[in-house]
Image (cartoon, rainbow, N blue to C red):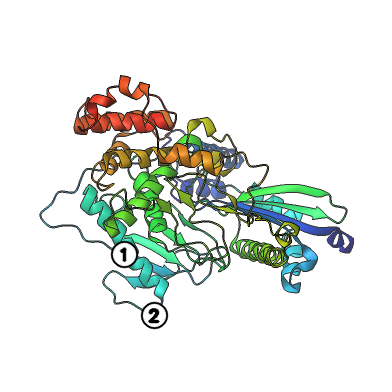
């Protein structure tokens, strides 16, 4: 975790100085140091709650004489909690014996390709950041996540989940990093749901780009290949039909809404970040269908350029919808078909601009 | 101490996070393998769980795993619930929670398989029962409604007023 000291009042004294004062100072000095530490802790907590860590404004497109090259590192977590684990394959290494390591190495390259080829973005941060992944995380761990600096994949329990190294999942997790380095979206309530939605949109787009699928040919499913054989469902989420991806007596029913009328007010899941993301997910799906062709050509460009411009970590769905319309306006013109379709996609999920 | 251990009969676990996968369930301590049951009794005590829940953790980190645990006593009383994230828990506790989650899933799978192998009365009579009925308490749109609205959004007067008709390719 990064704990950057930005508050001049609470953080002017670095921690090692405070430690020294506590050790060597008199009673009055010790109390001052302890009080300062407490205030710094409080300020840090408040800052973490308000602003995503390592937030940057949008990154400029890559332009250089030689194309950037990917740097991938895949670690073996050894079924333990500690990260990143033992380096299993570095960039340029030949394939090893571990199929999961080789698969993640290959698939992270496909995500890098999408961002570079279609959006001129050089890796996660736009500056060639190495793509770090850990596989075999924990024992029977049923999940995958981005922890702020790397991707982490469990093996699944073999019953409900057979694997998490699915291309849409890898594209999803890496795209959380892209959001983080493009201005950031606070991981709570509507801004958190937008963070999740951006990750889903670019997760499925990675699959479409890798397979050169047109929007009409794609499944629009996130995590299509992760469920075990006995699970009643096709994927973890469906952008085409949010709420209908699975209905299983163990996993429950896919809770995603597709329209603001069905918005789920909840305090769990950070305010329903994985639930209400169904609404902007479906708006993107509709836009892509209207514009046709390949999703990364027009609809994806609007979404990508919009996140570079957003500069609002607390954005609501309406804020995001508004900036996508402005972006389409800038790219295609005010009265263009594309701009009108962006407005229409949002209207059909209940967001009127 | 011995009396207190006997009083714990069930454990409720709910976990969510990461890709948005949520799992929850109860497990009878008696049904767990001996080693795991012993670990549950020694590691998941109110005192230890309170300490974990009080630890400081970064707020709102994408992908963070949330845990909620409730200890249930023999007289079916629920002790206080404990909520924490993977940032607050130490590695040994996370390993233990993974084992418990796996035990819950295995038990649910066993129950489901047994249920599927036992014909329902309606099936025995020849009717067409759904394999997985939609829960009655579901608050989400049913399949028919969602498919119609999602797949084919109709053009409407508002769109035409918005200039859509002119904008559509001829």
Q: Mark 2 vs mark 1: which is more N-terminal?
A: 1
**For the point 28% across and 51% down, which residue is it?**
A214
In this rendered view, identify the residue nearer to me: A8 or B140.
B140
The CA span between labels 2 and 1 is: 17 Å
Seen in the picture, residue B91 relative to A27 is either above or below; the reply is below
> Chain under label 1?
A
Local packing at callout 2 (Cα closer than 10 Å; few below 14, some 14-19, many 20+) is few
Please indicate, yes or no, whether residue A333 appears anywhere in the rendered image. Answer: yes
**For the point 36% across and 21% down, which residue is it?**
B158
> Chain under label 2?
A
**For the point 70% across and 68% down, which residue is it?**
B117
Q: Please state the horizontal and vertical placement of residue A258, each as a whole percent of the image.
A: 47, 38
Q: Please state the horizontal and vertical placement of residue A339, each as a whole percent of the image.
A: 26, 30
Q: Name the residue under label 2.
A: A97
Seen in the picture, residue A175 relative to B123 is either above or below; the reply is above
Looking at the image, how many numbered discs can be counted on the residues?
Answer: 2
Residue A271 as seen in the image, left or right of residue A168: right
Residue A123 as seen in the image, left or right of residue A28: left
Q: Please state the horizontal and vertical placement of residue B53, each as a whole percent of the image.
A: 65, 49
Which residue lies most toward the bottom here?
Answer: A97
Residue A48 as seen in the image, left or right of residue A140: left
Q: Indicate which disc residue A15 carries.
A: none
**For the point 41% across and 28% down, which residue is it?**
A318
Q: Mark 1 points at which residue?
A: A72
């Amino acid at each position: 975790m990064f704990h950057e000291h930005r508050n001049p009042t609470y953080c002017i004294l670095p921690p090692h100085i405070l430690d020294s004062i506590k050790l060597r100072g008199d009673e009055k000095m010790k109390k001052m140091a302890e009080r300062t530490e407490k205030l710094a802790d409080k300020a840090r907590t408040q800052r973490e709650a308000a602003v995503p860590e390592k937030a940057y404004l949008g990154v400029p497109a890559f332009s250089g004489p030689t194309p950037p090259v990917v740097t991938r590192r895949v670690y073996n977590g050894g079924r333990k909690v500690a990260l990143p684990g033992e380096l299993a394959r570095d960039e340029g290494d030949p394939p090893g014996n571990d199929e999961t390591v080789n698969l993640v190495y290959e698939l992270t390259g496909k995500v890098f390709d999408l961002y570079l080829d279609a959006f001129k973005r050089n890796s996660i941060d736009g500056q060639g950041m190495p793509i770090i992944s850990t596989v075999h995380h924990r024992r029977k761990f049923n999940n995958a996540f981005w922890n702020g600096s790397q991707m982490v994949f469990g093996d699944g329990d073999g019953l409900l989940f057979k694997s998490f190294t699915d291309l849409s999942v890898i594209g999803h997790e890496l795209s959380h990093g892209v959001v983080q380095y493009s201005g950031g979206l606070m991981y709570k309530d509507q801004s958190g749901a937008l963070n999740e939605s951006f990750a889903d949109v670019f997760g499925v787009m990675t699959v479409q780009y890798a397979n050169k699928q047109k929007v009409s040919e794609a499944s629009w499913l996130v995590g299509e290949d992760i469920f075990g054989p006995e699970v009643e469902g096709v994927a973890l989420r469906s952008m085409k039909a949010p709420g209908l991806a699975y209905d299983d007596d163990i996993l429950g029913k896919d809770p995603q809404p597709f329209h603001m009328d069905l918005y789920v007010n909840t305090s769990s899941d950070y305010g329903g970040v994985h639930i209400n993301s169904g609404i902007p997910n479906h708006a993107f799906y509709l836009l892509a269908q209207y514009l046709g062709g390949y999703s990364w050509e027009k609809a994806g460009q609007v979404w990508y350029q919009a996140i570079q411009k957003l500069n609002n970590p607390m954005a609501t769905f309406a804020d995001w919808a508004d900036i996508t319309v402005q972006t389409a306006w800038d790219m295609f013109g005010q009265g263009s078909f594309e701009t009108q379709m962006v407005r229409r996609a949002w209207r059909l999920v209940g967001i009127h601009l | 101490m011995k009396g207190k251990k006997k009083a714990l009969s069930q454990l409720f676990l709910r976990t969510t996070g990461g890709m948005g996968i949520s799992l929850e369930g109860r497990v009878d301590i008696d049904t767990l393998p001996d080693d795991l049951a012993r670990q549950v009794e020694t590691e998941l005590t109110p005192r230890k769980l309170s300490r974990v829940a009080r630890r400081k953790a970064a707020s709102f980190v994408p992908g963070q795993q949330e845990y909620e645990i409730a200890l249930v006593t023999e007289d079916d009383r629920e002790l206080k619930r404990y909520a924490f994230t993977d940032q607050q828990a130490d590695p040994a506790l996370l390993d233990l929670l993974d084992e418990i989650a796996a035990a819950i899933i295995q038990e649910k799978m066993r129950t489901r398989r047994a249920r599927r192998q036992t014909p329902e009365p309606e099936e025995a009579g020849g009717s067409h029962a759904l394999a997985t009925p939609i829960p009655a308490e579901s608050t989400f749109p049913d399949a028919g409604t969602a498919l119609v609205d999602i797949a084919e959004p109709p053009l409407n007067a508002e769109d035409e007023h918005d200039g859509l008709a002119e904008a559509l390719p001829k």
